[in-house]
Image (spheres, rainbow, N blue to C red):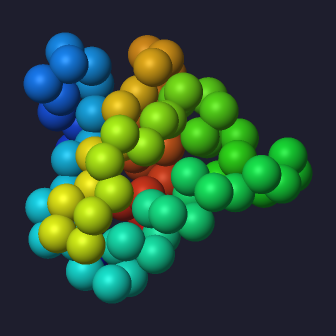
Amino acid sequence: MRKFEVTTSVHGMPSLEVRDPTEEEGKILRELLACNWINDIRYELRCEAGAFLQSDHSDYILIEFWKPTYQNLIDWLNNQ
């Protein structure tokens, strides 16, 4: 799996932009954003980062971070 890095979206927001995600990457990212179990680390990290799914296509995923505390989420993703 690739190393995820934060970039800046066209909206000027810190973001995670993934072009041509593998099936595994897409699954991890979608499960992260869909998780609503408050005792799950994915939920905690998503809320801490203010992660917002801006675009979800088979060849492109864009997640914007609406809070400046997104690094823990990126670190967690890179350790998966």
Residue 59 is situated, as x and y percent measured from the top left of the image, at 17, 69
Q: Quadrant of residue 23?
A: bottom left
Residue 49 is situated, as x and y percent measured from the top left of the image, at 52, 29
Where 55 falls versus 52 (above or below)? below
Give the number of callouts.
Answer: 0
In the visual, does 1 lie left or right of 42? left
Where's the N terminus, which quadrant?
Answer: bottom left
Residue situated in front as seen by the camera: 64 or 78: 64
In the visual, does 29 lie left or right of 36? left
Where 44 falls versus 32 (above or below)? above
Would residue 41 be visible to someone looking at this image? no
Residue at horizontal 47 percent and vertical 70 percent from the top = 28
Would residue 61 be visible to someone looking at this image? yes
Residue at horizontal 49 percent and vertical 54 percent from the top = 76
In the image, farthest residue toward the bottom: 23
Q: Quadrant of residue 44?
A: top right
Residue at horizontal 61 percent and vertical 41 percent from the top = 45
Where 63 falls versus 34 (above or below)? above
Where 19 falls versus 8 (above or below)? below
Residue at horizontal 43 percent and vertical 43 percent from the top = 53
